[in-house]
Image: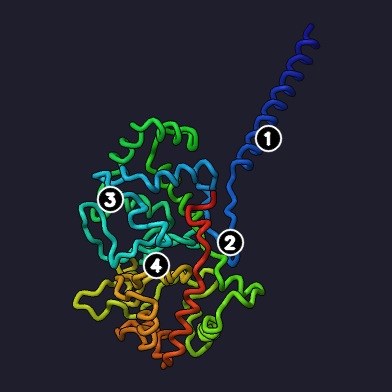
């Protein structure tokens, strides 16, 4: 009898172990099945992407983040969403000189495009955010933007049956500030731009660029202009901070990176922006001081604006009229296709 009991318990233990392993295997398979892989367009490299380990992409999370991105109720008066300053029709910039928030309040900096932010770690023009998740939470609470409190945002979303069920399904919890930021950040990471005329030219389509754009490309890559010193790699940015003098001649200039590090050498430094879709994201510079691409080219041709911390990479270029036109045509060739502007579906 004792022997039969021991045999029964041993078999039962094996059965439980088998069931547990089977369950874990199914769970792993399910997680792998739900993982979302961004379908990068021509010219971008997957190895350059930064996706936090604690916020892997899933289709369900991205879908929720997309809806939240256009949700006006994230702002205190339910009038503006993330898309107010990051318009899909304007390459996720907004076309204003300075960002604008609730009640028409103006910020102090120009809204950056959200395209290809998946390739960056530090965010904002001064790099104060370590990831996109932090950006979301700051925008919600910034008094000149959405001017809301996290408690109020969570209360509004939790009271909505759709969101209550969606967060429960995606995150297995009620609406929290962490899950909210993770959902929107996941959507933002799918906003990628590539497959531009430049990309097609570089992969063998010699008809993709006009003669002027080809001359502009040669100029851009030349040691004389040294554009690649800052606008490097597939995303045309070193994701570093540089001082080109923009706004530094004002009575009270925006000191950019200095406010974060408090190091004198960082005064007037701002993150190098991507040049992807640059023709759609005017006006330019952190303060929106340059209206057109030609204005930007003229600015660099003059050697920026002199100040104590001007980068040694910035020098007068001595461009001819034709060279300026050629450079503008090249920059226009970095405009990607629109098919991915609503995120990878």
- Distance between the alpha carbons at the discs numbered 3 and 4: 22 Å
Name the side, left or right, on which 216 lies relative to 143: right
* Image quadrant where residue 100 sits: bottom left
Q: Which of the two residues, 85 or 270, is positioned nearer the viewer here?
A: 85
Give me the C-alpha separation between circle 2 and circle 4. 19 Å
What residue is shown at x 48% (from left), y 79% (from top)? 329
Query: How busy is the neighbourhood of tag 4: few (under 14 within 10 Å), some, or many (20 plus)?
Result: many
Count of marks placed on residues:
4
Helix, strand or loop for disc 4: loop
Answer with mark 3 or mark 4, whichever residue precedes in sequence.
Answer: 3
Q: Earlier in the sequence, mark 2 or mark 1?
A: 1
Query: Which mark is on residue 210?
Result: none
User: What residue would you read off at disc 2?
Assistant: 41
Residue labelled with disc 3: 146
Label 2 – label 1 distance at C-alpha: 33 Å
In the image, which disc is placed on residue 281? 4
Tell whether 186 sits left or right of 258: right
Number of the front mark, 1 or 4: 4
Q: Earlier in the sequence, mark 3 or mark 1?
A: 1
Q: Which residue is mark 1?
A: 25
Residue 70 in the image: above or below residue 268:
above
Marks 3 and 1: which is nearer the front? Answer: 3
Is residue 331 depicted above or below 78 in this figure?
below
Image-quadrant location for residue 101: bottom left
Task: Say whether disc 2 or disc 3 marks the residue closer to the N-terminus.
Answer: 2
Q: CA distance from mark 2 to mark 3?
A: 33 Å
Q: Label 2, secondary structure: give it.
A: loop
Q: Alpha carbon of mark 1 to alpha carbon of mark 4: how far?
A: 47 Å
Examine the image and state in which quarter residue 289 appears. bottom left
């Amino acid at each position: 009898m004792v022997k039969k009991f021991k045999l029964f318990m041993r078999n039962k233990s094996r059965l439980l172990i088998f069931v547990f392993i089977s369950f874990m295997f199914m769970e792993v398979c399910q997680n792998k099945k739900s993982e979302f892989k961004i379908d990068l367009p021509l010219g971008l490299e997957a190895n350059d992407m930064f996706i936090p380990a604690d916020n892997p992409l899933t289709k369900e999370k991205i879908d929720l983040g997309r809806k939240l991105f256009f949700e006006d109720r994230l702002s205190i008066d339910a009038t503006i969403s993330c898309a107010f300053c990051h318009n899909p029709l304007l390459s996720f910039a907004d076309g204003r000189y300075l960002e604008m928030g609730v009640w028409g309040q103006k910020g102090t900096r120009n809204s950056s495009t959200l395209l290809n932010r998946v390739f960056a770690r530090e965010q904002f023009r001064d790099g104060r955010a370590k990831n996109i998740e932090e950006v979301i939470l700051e925008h919600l609470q910034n008094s000149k933007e959405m001017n809301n409190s996290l408690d109020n945002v969570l209360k509004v979303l939790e009271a909505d049956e759709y969101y209550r069920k969606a967060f429960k399904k995606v995150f297995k919890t009620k609406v929290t500030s962490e899950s909210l930021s993770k959902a929107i950040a996941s959507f933002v990471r799918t906003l990628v731009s590539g497959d531009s005329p430049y990309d097609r030219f570089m992969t063998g389509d010699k008809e993709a660029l006009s003669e002027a754009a080809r001359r502009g490309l040669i100029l851009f890559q030349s040691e004389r202009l040294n554009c690649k010193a800052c606008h490097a790699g597939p995303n045309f940015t070193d994701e570093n901070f540089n001082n080109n003098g923009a706004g530094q001649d004002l009575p009270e200039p925006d000191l950019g990176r200095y406010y974060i590090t408090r190091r004198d050498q960082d005064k007037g430094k701002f993150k190098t922006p991507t040049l992807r879709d640059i023709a759609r994201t005017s006006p330019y510079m952190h303060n929106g001081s340059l209206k057109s691409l030609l204005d930007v080219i003229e600015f660099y041709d003059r050697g920026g604006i002199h100040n104590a911390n001007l980068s040694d990479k910035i020098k007068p270029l001595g461009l001819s009229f034709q060279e300026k036109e050629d450079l503008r045509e090249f920059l226009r060739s970095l405009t990607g296709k629109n098919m991915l502007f609503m995120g990878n579906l």
